Structures are given as structure tokens and as C-alpha cells.
Image (tube, rainbow, N blue to C red):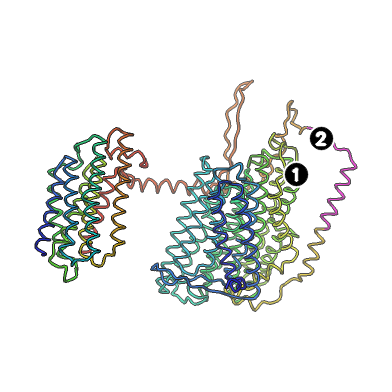
Amino acid sequence: MLFEILRDPAALVIAALVVAALSGVPGLLLRRAPLGQRLAACLAVAASLLALPALTRMLLAGERARYLIDWSLPFGVCEIALDPLSLFFLLPIFLVFPAGAVYACGYWPAARHRASEPSVTFFYGLLCAAMGLVVVARNGALFLVAWEVMALAGYFLLVTEHEHDEVRSAGTVYLIASHVGAAALILLFSQLRIVSGGFLFPATGSLHLAAASSTLIFLAALTGFGSKAGLMPLHIWLPSAHANAPSHVSALLSGVMLKMGIYGLLRVLSFFPERPLWWGALLAAAGLASALMGIGIASAQKDIKRLLAYSSIENLGIIAAGIGVALVGESTGNPRLAYLGLAGALFHVLNHSLFKPLLFFGAGSVMHATGSRELDRMGGLASRMPWSALFSLAGAVAICGLPPFNGFASEFLLYLGFFGEARAAEPYVALGAPLLALVGGVALLSFVKLLGSAFLGAPRSSQAGAAHESPPSMLAPMALLAGLCLVGGLFPRLFLALAAPVFPTLAPLSLRFTELPFRPPWFTLAGCGVLALAAALFWYLRRRSAALPVVSGPTWGCGYLRPTPRMQYTASSFGAMFGSLAAPLIRTRIKKSALTGVAPEAGRLSYQPEETLLYRVILPAFSVAGIGFSFLRRLQQGQVQFYILYIFATLLLLMLWVR
Amino acid sequence: MTSLADQLLVLCLLLNFAVLGTSRLAVSVRAVALQGVVLGVLPTLVHPFSWHLVLIVVSIVVAKGAVIPMLIMRAIRKADIEREFQPFIGYIPSLLLGALFTALAFIFAARLPLAPEHEGLLFVPASIATLMCGFLVLMGRRKAISQVIGYLLMENGIFIFGLLLADAMPLMVEAGALLDLLVGIFVMGIVINHISREFSSLDTSRLSALREE
């Protein structure tokens, strides 16, 4: 019996989800917290060792599985199923989850965070399992339950450090945004129930609907799933949430939870046999806009994790643009565009779930060492924590879409898709290429700024000067992810093989496009060449600098007599030029005290980048809505008797109604 | 036998008014206890004999007639209060509203789509009227003990409705409901003790510190 189960890969995947859900439970019961945390990490690794081979095997062999759960709730049959789309999105879950669990042992050790560690570990496992359930659920009600568990587990992880005001307010914004998204999803599933007669998901390509109904479904899905994926302008919860969570949580939230939005969107799209052209165009435009705006705002950030969070918006935008382009290709009968768009998007899903956790882990190491998130207070960390610096460099190169890492490979596919349209009769799609190039350029600027001000130069604060390298439990997950990034960049066919089984579900037309427009061996060779060139250059420069005398001294302070290391070129000054170009999107609010007289008193200056959209449009709109709803406060009397009166009045009304 | 049952139900309705019309807490508690005993005896009149029934009757009479009133009386003695002062709804208006709701309950019950064997019985209107009187006590009184009495009245109303189904009602359900009630009383008892210790009064209208401003 047990042997039978062990041979069935689908059962193994389900078992792994259960193990993941329970991984934090021993920690809640055990007296000795460090043991619980280590046990949770072991269970997480075990779950992923169970799941990943099974997932790969099922994907490559094209296997599917479905299970019917016997439940007595009035939502129809409860089905969970593993098809290629589900399997593909389970991959990032089981890649990032164990990495984060191991990383937590060093980053959020139970010995130092005695009170919060058990709950963080528990919700970490629960979040992973809930995301898994979201992906395998085939019943609208079950999906919403799993979605809600995911959102709430994310909330409890996010408010781990709830003693800070900033964290609490980030949590509240997250909660509101995720429930607004859930409201759209409830609309979506009720509409689906009306048209299909049940909560069970319709089979792939089986939904033939009138235009109005399908438009409603698409827009509800775009709102609900788009807000989870952080598409602009539904992204407002994302930056503060990812910045304020512990780093291993940010890694899971950013690397995996955002993808659940993409998954939901793809799942809903797969119901429709044919999609109007404007769906793809809208998705591509929204994706490119949020990529450009996301990275534009990222470039002005001075908070290392906020920068990464905005760059997540950029990457999710690129993924959405890829999907949009694939839809355009599908509806205009262009297999090449359909293939390249979808391949680029799915490849980028996998890639982003590798390099974004890597970068968040890197940011976590930096914060662990310096105790600050502000780039302008770091500096010189490369000599104190060389491994973290190296892995962060790998992640940054990958996220900027530079060879030989995986980000280049996926964006290359998108570029090929865009350029291929340049000779078409109406080459609008080709306009995506310069936009994507601009995004890549600004991403490069942002990450040069991040790496340069955190790791190079002289330490700008005493904490940065006293920084230490992270323990192996933090470095090992980073090394693993960096290695996978390199593998993905050198051998893109490995990752594409995992994405290929998904194609028939989403874009049947793309199957007619069989030959990749480039030769993979050459790709590998060129990647290795770049790597070798970089290594050679590094050794040459190192030998040269070893031969020359090194003089270190204070920064030139314009004749000021007491220069400090903080007078180095800061991250903010590095981004200032582009910041002035992006002023409509983001402005830096500077607070300073006025200096008067010949010998003024000591002054202070602080600055904070503020997002225009959020502070000028969305928050004012919310406060207007708040005034409109203030009459509800009067109902909130606070006296038991009044609440009983409300219940009684409702009861009477219902009785009259029934009569 | 149904005429005797109807008379007992009328007694229950009158006891509702006794609770509504008095300011003395001890009187309310005794009235509710008497109502509990009357209701406990009722099943023997409407259903054929069985050991299951005996068990239900005995447990209900013991719980509603003795244990719960004793707990409340002890709370009254401990907190050293006798009367309900300044209720939100005065005693005369309470009585009038009680009469109105009882009348409404009869009208409403006449229009309910009941099973034919239950039509014309007093059970349904008495149940709804008792439920509403419980609500009235909950809404109108300030003291935490009055709140407990209100809940007891409501439970009695639900119990009357349940009598129609006593044959079908398994023992476990009945026991569960009783247990619920006991736990509820215990919780209220703890709340009462804490309120009287913190505020040196049992006024529930002071429990509004946690509302959102």
C-alpha cells in the first residue's frame, strides 16, 4: 500500500504539501525552540526532495492526476488536480520554500527571536501549503478558501515585527488590498458558476460565452489576480509589505506568492477557447507599463528591500507583457509570437522565483550584518562579507537580464518575439522591444546603485564597518539559487523543457512553432565565453591592483575640514539623475530645517522617496470614501444592548419577509 | 393531555411577564427557574414514555431548576446587588412591548407553514414569544446578571420549539445543548465577577471601552 503510494508521483506531491503544512507544528509544541526550527527546516527540505523529482517526472512525462475529495459543503464536487500548468507553478513553491526555511535558521534564529520564531515557522509552512492548494484546487470555493488561507498566512508572517508602527500599517494595507482582490475573485467565481452551473472549474477551452459575460470574467480576473501579482496601479500594498516582512518571508512572498496571481490569470485564460485581441493587447500594455513604472520607482529608492519590491513589480510586469503578447499572437494566428511570448513569460516566472529570493536573501544578509535597510548607511561590505556579495552580484546580473544568467535567456525570448514583429504589416508589437530595453537599462542602473552603495567603497556607518559574514545556513540557500540562475542562463533548454508541457493548455497555436530561433549550444558557448572573459578580466585587474600600492584616505570633502565616509557618493546621488527624469512618478520629499544667520545652529536633513500615484491619487480617494462612509461609525455604539437590538431588528425584518 | 400542556405553556408566557415586570433580580431568577421546571415536565405530557425521555426530563429539571439558578443566586449574593436600576427600557414599557410581541408571535405562528400535526398547538407561538421576551430583557437591562436571565429566557424559547421534535432529538444533541448552556452560564459568571471587581458595578453599558472611535 505504502509502496504503491510512493511510486505514484502525484501522491508524493500531495504528501509533500501535507508535510509542508505541518512543518511548523512541532515547533509550536516543543519547549526547545531551536530544535523546532531545525526540524521545520529538515521537513521543508524533505518535502521538496519528495516533490521536486515527482514534479519534474510528471511534467516531462506529461502525466496528469485528479482526485475527488468527499466533502459535505454545498459547493458541488471538490476536485484537486495536477495538470502541467499546476505542476509548473508548484516548482517555484518547492524551490523557494526549503531555501527560505534553511535560511531562516541563520536569519531568524529561535535563540534570538524566542517569541516570534514558532509562529513565523508555522505560518511559513502553512503559506507554502496554501499556495500549493491554490494551484491544485479545481473548485472555485476550495480555491477561494486556499487563497484566503494564503493571504492570511502571508499577513501573519508580514506583521512578525508588529511592535513597529510601520509594519502594522503595511500589514493593514496588505490586508485591505488582498480583500479587495478577493472580492473581485468572488465576483469571478460567482459569474463562472452562473455560466457553467457549478463551482467546478470548466475544462480547458470549454467556455463559449457571450462577449459581455466573458468580458466580465476577464476583467474580474485581471483585477483580482492582478492585484496579487502587483500590476500597476493595483500594486500599492506590495512595496511596503515586502519591505517590512523578515527577508526570508519577503523572498517567499515576492518569489512565489506574486506568481499565484499569474497562475490564476493563466488558469482563467485557459478556460476560453478563443480570446479577443484586446485582452492580449490590454495585458501586454498593462505589463509593459507596470514594468517601466515599477523599475522607474525602484531606481529612486534608498531602502534596499523597497528597491527589490519595486523591481518585483517590474518583473511581474514583464511576465504579464509576455502573456499578453502570446495572447495577441494566438488571436492573430501567429505561432511564433504565441510561442515566444508564452515561453518568455513562463521562463521568466521560473527565473524570477530564483533570483528574487536570492536578492532578498542577500538583502537579509546585509541587514543581518548592519541592522539597517538604508543603502546610504552601508558601504564596503564586499570585503567583510565576500560570499554574500558574490551571490548578490549573481542575482543582480540575472535580474538585469544580462548574460550569462537566466534573466537574459527569458528576456531574450521576449526580445525575439518583439523583433520578429518588426517586419509585420502592423508592427505595433515591435514597439515592446525598445520599452523592454529601457526597462532593462533602468534595472541595470538600479542594481548598480544597490550593489555599489552596499558593497563597495568605505563603510558609511560604524555598523557597516563592523559587519560580519553570514553563517553557512544563510549562504547555502543563496549558493543554490545562484547556481540555478547560472544553469538557467547557460542551458535554457532545461527550463524550457519544464515549461513546454504547459503550452497546449494555454496557446495551442504555439505548438506549430517547433524550432527555437537560436542554437542552444551556441547560447551555452557564448555564455561560458562571457563568464570566462569576466573571470579573466577580474584576475587581470586583481593582479594589477596587487602590484600597485593602495592608498586609502577620506573622501574629498570640498575643503570641509572634517570629512566622514558618509560624504561618499551615495545611493541617492547615484539615482538622482534618473530620479529627475522620473519625477512625475516619484518625488523625493526633503525635510530640512532652515539655516539662518552667519553661524547657524545644527540642522537636520532627511529625505524620503514618495510615490506620486499612491500619495496624490489613491490615498486622497480613500479618504474621500472614508468621509462618505462615516455614517457607519454611528452604528458602532459599543454597547452590548445596541448590538442585540440590531440582531433583533434583523430577526423581525426576516420574519416579516418570510411572512 | 394537550389541554394540560397548553395550560402549562400559558404559565410559561405569564412567567415571561413576571421577568419583564420586576426590578428584583431574585424574583426574575426564580421565575426563570420555575419556567425551566415547567418546561422540563412538559415532554412527559406530549410524548410516550421512554427511558430516554426520563433522562432528558430529569437532567433538564436539575439543570434549569436547580444548578443554574443556584449559580446565579450565588453571583447575586457575591456582587451584593438586588435590583436593576435605571433600565434602558422601563418596566411598564417592557410589559407593553412584551404583550405586543406575544400578540405578534401568535399572528406570525398562525402563518408559518407548519406540519399538520403541529398546527393549532400553543408550542410555536409560546416559543417565539419567549424568545422575543428574552431579547427584550437583553436589550432593556444594564446589569450583567439581567443579561444572563435574558439568555436563559431565550434558551427556554428555543427549548419549547425543540419539544415538538423531542422524539427525533437524539440524547447527544440534548446533552450538548445543556452543556452549552452550562458553559455559557459559567463564562457569564466569570465575566460578572470580573466586571464587579474592575468597575465595582455590574453595568454592562460600561463595557464600551473597546469600541472603535
Q: For the stretch drawn in magenta, what is the main secondary structure?
A: helix
> Which of the marked residues, 2 or 1, is nearer the chain's N terminus?
1
Residue A592: x, y in percent?
A: 58, 32
Q: Mark 1 lies on which chain?
A: A
- Mark 2 or 1, which is nearer the eye? 1
Left or right, A129 with respect to B159, comes to: right
- Examine the rendering and report whether any part of residue A656 can be seen: no
Q: Which chain carries label 2?
A: A
Q: How far apart are marks 2 and 1 (CA)?
A: 16 Å
Looking at the image, the residue that sits furthest to the front is: B51
| Residue A169 falls inside the magenta stretch | no
- Which residue type does callout 2 highlight? Ser
Q: What element does badge 2 sit on? A: loop
Q: Give the position of the N terminus of chain B as an image quadrant.
A: bottom left
Identify which residue is drawn at 53% across, 42% down: A166
Residue located 29% across and 44% down the image: A640
Can residue A550 be found in the magenta stretch?
yes
